[in-house]
C-alpha cells in the first residue's frame, strides 16, 4: 500500500470536530452509537441544527454500511435523510436533519403529564405519515425491521414542523430475492414488544407484514400510552427468536391462534415448542376486542376496525400499508394533517442534553409502572445502532425503480394537499444536504 498517498489523503479529510459544535450536547445513547445535537461552527445563532451520530468502534460495521447504503438511495418526506458521511482516522460520523421530538417522548409526556389524551387528529396524522413512509420503503423492497416509538421522529420548529420521519435503518434489509433467508442473516430482529408472532415462532422467511404488526403496536400505544405487548424480562437471548414470555403476553391479549385463523402455523419452526409450552384453554377469554374494551375503545369504531387489520396473527392476512392508507378511518373527520401539531396546543418539551445516568432513568420511565424491573433494548436514541454479524456480506444496492408514493394529506381546512406541501399549501424548504452544500464546501 502507498502509505504516503494514504497519509496525504487522510490529511485532506474533513474533521467533524473542526466543522461542528457538538461537545456536551449528547441527545441519545445506544449500545453501538452516540447521537449529538450539532450546528456549524461558522453559522450564526439562527442556524439550522443537525443530528450527528458517532458510530462507536473502529471503522465501518456491517450495520453502518447497510444503513448508509440504503439511506443514500432512499428519498422520501417521511424518511430521515442522510446528509453526509464523515470518515477520519477510522471514526465514522453520520449527519442527519435534527428532529426535536419522537413518539417515545410524546407518549411518555402523555403518560406522565396532563393533558393525558393525545388529540384524535394528531394520532391520525402521526399514523398516516408513518404509513406513508413505510409504504415508500415497502414499494422499494425495503423492510425496516425495527419500528418502535423511539425510531419515529417528529420535526420541531421550521419548514417541516410536525412532519414524521422514520429513522434508524441499521436493521433494514432488501427483501426482493435475498441470496439467503433473512432469518439466517439476523436470527433476532425488532425490539421484543413490537415483534410479530411469526418472528417469535422462528420464521425463516418473512415479509413486510412484520413492519405492519409493529405499526399496529405503535398505533395502540398512541391510543393507550402503554405498550400493548409489554413483557417484563431480565435478558433476551439474541441467538434464538423464540421467546416464551413474549408469546404468552401476545396470547393474553389476542387469544391463542387457531389453525383456521392461521393456516400455516403448523409450518412454523417453533410450533412444536409452542404446543409443548402453552395450553390453549388458558386463553379462551382473551381477545383484542376485550383488551381494547378495557381501554374504552369502541369495537364499532373505525379506529378499532383499522387496528384489527394491523394486529392479525396470520401475516398473510395483515393489511398492507397501501391499503391502510385508503382505510375509511382516514376519510372521516378530522382529516390527517401534514403537520401533526396543527391545532394542537400541547407544549411538548424540547430534547434535553443527557448523561449516561439519564439514559438509565429513561429506561425505567418508559414503563407504565415505575416499579417494574429494568428493560433491555429500549433506550430511546435518535438513531440507535443495532448488533450485526461481522461476517455477513453487505448487500449490493440496486437502483430504486419503484416510484415514490405521494399519498394525499389533508391540511387544517380539510383540503387535500401534496405530501411535499405544508398546511398552507407551500412547498417546504427545510435544509438538506443539497441546500447546505455551499456551507459544507467551505471546509
Image (cartoon, helix red, strand yellow):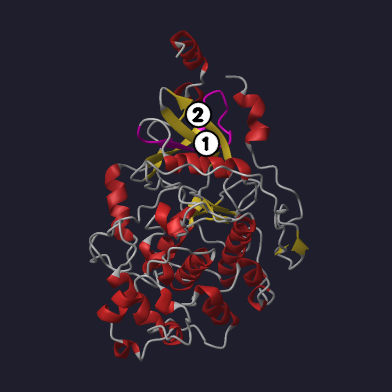
Say which residue appears at 35% left-offset and 76% top-offset: 271
Q: Is residue 378 above or below residue 52?
A: below
Q: Which residues are magenta?
A: 39-57
Most foreground residue, 410 or 233 = 233
Reply yes or no: does residue 273 show up in magenta: no
Tell me the SS state at disc 2.
strand
Q: Position of residue 17 (x, y in %)?
A: 45, 24
Disc 1 to disc 2, C-alpha distance: 8 Å
Q: Residues within 10 Å of mark 1 (few under 14, many from 20)?
A: many
Residue 105 seen from this side: no
Q: Looking at the picture, does residue 200 appear above or below residue 397?
A: below
Q: Quadrant of residue 104?
A: bottom left
Q: Which residue is mark 1?
A: 95
User: Do labels 1 and 2 touch, CB within 8 Å?
Assistant: yes
N-terminal of the two: label 1 or label 2? 2
Which numbered dot is residue 137? none
* Residue 144 position in % (x across, y down): 51, 55
Q: Quadrant of residue 288?
A: bottom left
Q: Could one spot residue 271 in this view of the protein?
A: yes
Q: Nearer the viewer, residue 248 or 222?
A: 248
Q: Nearer the viewer, mark 1 or mark 2?
A: 2
Pick the front one: 270 or 115: 270
- Determine if the magenta segment contains residue 44: yes
Quick one: 236 or 42, which is closer to the camera? Answer: 236
Q: Kindly identify which residue carries mark 2.
A: 86
Q: In this rendering, would 85 be left or right of 412?
A: left
Q: How many marks?
A: 2
Q: Is residue 66 above or below residue 23?
A: below
Q: Locate the C terminus by quadrant.
A: top right
Q: Secondary structure at mark 1?
A: strand
In the rendered structure, the answer to whether residue 30 lies left or right of residue 276 reads right
Residue at 55% of width from left, 69% of height from top? 119
Amino acid at each position: 500500500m502507498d502509505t504516503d498517498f494514504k497519509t496525504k489523503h487522510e490529511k485532506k479529510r474533513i474533521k467533524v470536530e473542526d466543522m461542528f459544535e457538538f461537545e456536551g450536547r449528547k441527545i441519545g445513547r445506544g449500545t453501538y452509537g452516540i447521537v449529538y445535537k450539532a450546528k456549524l461552527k461558522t453559522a450564526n445563532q439562527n442556524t439550522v441544527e443537525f443530528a450527528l451520530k458517532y458510530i462507536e468502534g473502529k471503522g465501518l460495521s456491517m450495520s453502518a454500511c447497510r444503513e448508509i447504503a440504503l439511506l443514500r438511495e432512499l428519498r422520501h418526506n417521511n424518511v430521515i435523510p442522510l446528509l453526509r458521511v464523515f470518515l477520519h482516522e477510522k471514526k465514522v460520523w453520520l449527519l442527519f436533519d435534527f428532529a426535536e421530538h419522537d413518539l417515545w417522548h410524546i407518549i411518555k409526556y402523555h403518560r406522565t403529564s396532563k393533558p393525558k389524551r393525545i388529540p384524535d387528529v394528531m394520532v391520525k396524522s402521526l399514523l398516516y405519515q408513518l404509513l406513508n413512509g413505510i409504504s415508500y420503503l415497502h414499494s422499494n423492497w425495503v423492510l425496516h425491521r425495527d419500528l418502535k416509538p423511539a425510531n419515529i421522529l417528529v420535526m420541531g420548529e421550521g419548514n417541516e414542523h410536525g412532519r414524521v420521519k422514520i429513522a434508524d435503518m441499521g436493521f433494514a434489509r432488501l427483501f426482493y430475492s435475498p441470496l439467503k433467508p433473512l432469518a439466517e442473516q439476523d436470527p433476532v430482529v425488532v425490539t421484543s414488544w413490537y415483534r410479530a408472532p411469526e418472528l417469535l415462532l422462528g420464521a425463516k422467511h418473512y415479509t413486510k407484514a412484520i413492519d405492519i404488526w409493529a405499526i399496529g403496536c405503535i398505533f395502540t400505544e398512541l391510543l393507550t400510552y402503554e405498550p400493548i405487548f409489554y413483557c417484563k424480562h431480565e435478558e433476551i437471548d439474541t441467538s434464538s427468536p423464540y421467546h416464551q414470555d413474549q408469546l404468552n403476553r401476545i396470547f393474553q391479549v389476542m387469544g391463542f391462534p387457531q389453525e383456521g385463523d392461521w393456516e400455516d402455523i403448523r409450518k412454523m419452526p417453533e410450533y412444536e415448542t409452542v404446543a409443548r409450552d402453552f395450553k390453549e384453554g388458558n386463553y379462551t377469554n382473551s381477545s383484542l376486542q376485550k383488551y381494547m374494551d378495557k381501554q374504552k375503545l369502541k369495537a364499532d369504531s373505525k379506529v378499532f376496525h383499522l387496528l384489527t387489520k394491523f394486529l392479525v396473527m396470520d401475516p398473510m392476512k395483515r393489511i398492507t400499508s397501501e391499503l391502510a392508507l385508503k382505510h375509511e378511518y382516514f376519510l372521516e373527520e378530522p382529516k390527517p394533517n401534514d403537520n401533526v401539531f396543527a391545532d394542537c396546543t400541547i407544549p411538548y418539551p424540547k430534547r434535553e442534553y443527557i448523561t449516561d445516568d439519564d439514559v438509565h432513568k429513561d429506561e425505567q420511565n418508559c414503563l407504565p409502572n415505575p416499579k417494574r424491573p429494568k428493560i433491555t433494548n429500549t433506550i430511546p436514541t435518535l438513531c440507535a445502532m443495532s448488533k450485526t454479524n461481522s461476517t455477513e456480506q453487505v448487500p449490493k444496492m440496486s437502483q430504486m425503480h419503484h416510484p415514490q408514493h405521494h399519498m394525499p394529506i389533508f391540511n387544517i381546512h380539510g383540503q387535500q394537499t401534496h405530501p411535499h406541501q405544508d398546511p398552507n399549501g407551500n412547498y417546504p424548504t427545510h435544509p438538506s444536504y443539497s441546500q447546505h452544500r455551499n456551507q459544507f464546501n467551505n471546509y
